[in-house]
Structure formats: C-alpha cells, structure tokens
Image (spheres, rainbow, N blue to C red):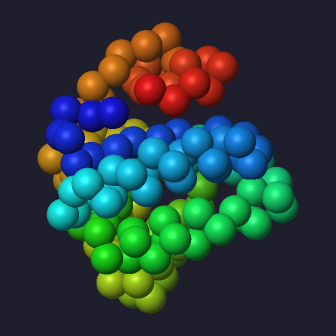
Amino acid sequence: ATTRPDTYAFTWNGKISRSDLDRVVSVLEVEMQSHTSVRLLGRIEHVGGIELSALKNPALLRAKLLGARKVERYALVGDARWLAAYARTVSWLSGIPMRHFPMNREHEAWAWVEAQPAVRSHGARGWGVTRDNTIH
C-alpha cells in the first residue's frame, strides 16, 4: 500500500515461493481490474530465485497480460548490475515505462511514481514489509 490508491510497492528479498507469488498476483490482479491504470515500485534486494511451481500459476499470465495494458509506470530499485538493462529491455518490449533507480536514489523512484509508502513497519528499510515478509 502507498499514499496513492493506484500505486503498489513490493520487496523481493530471497527466493519466491508459489504462495508468495500467488498472494502478490491475486492482489495485483484485483487492483489492476479496479483501476484505469496502476503504478508499481519494486525494491529488489536479493534475487534468490523462483520456485518452478510458482511459474505454473495461470493467474500469473493473466496478471502479466493485464499489466501490459494497465501499468502506467514501473520503478525498479536495486543495486544489481543487470537491473538497468532489464528495465530498459522490458520497457522497450512491453511499452511499459519502466525505470531503474539504485538503492541510494530510492527517494527518486518514489517521486517518479508520485507516491510514498503508506505503511511504516520495522521491516526491510522500514516500509510495507515486515521481517517475516508479510506484505501490507
């Protein structure tokens, strides 16, 4: 949750399980259907992979197709070297405006999506996700 009703943030920190992906996809699918457009901010702290079973979820494909029409802006925050090239490539292939921001410029990513975190917690970097990866 963020300060904009059409903007959502998430953190990727470790390996994504099927239940993680199911939870995120179900929320985003409902939200994308209820808004004309949405904005996303993803903080990529550590990519530990994705369980193969998570990719077999038919809702994932539906959410991706819906996202291609509904995502207005997508900010990726992270220091991995490949993120900038990934953002450029996905933006070019999908037409979704996607930009990369290093961790030390996360505030610029929030400004670009024109939102701020709505939930403060003691989680990763203090917003939206608790230490046990509970998504708010």
Q: Is residue 28 above or below residue 81?
A: above
Which residue shows up at 82% across the image and 58% down it?
A: 53
Q: Is residue 30 above or below residue 55?
A: above
For residue 9, say whether it is visible.
yes
Q: Nearer the viewer, residue 101 or 60?
A: 60
Q: Nearer the viewer, residue 43 or 31?
A: 31
For residue 102, say whether it is visible.
no
Residue 105, position in %: x, y? Answer: 33, 44
Q: Residue furthest top?
A: 122
* On-image quarter of the C terminus: top left
Which residue shows up at 84% across the image and 61% down it?
A: 52
* On-image quarter of the N terminus: top left
Residue 17, position in %: x, y? Answer: 76, 45
Classify residue 83 as left or right of residue 13: left
Classify residue 113 as left or right of residue 32: left
Classify residue 132 as left or right of residue 70: right
Which residue shows up at 33% across the image and 50% down it?
A: 31
The quadrant where residue 37 appears: bottom left
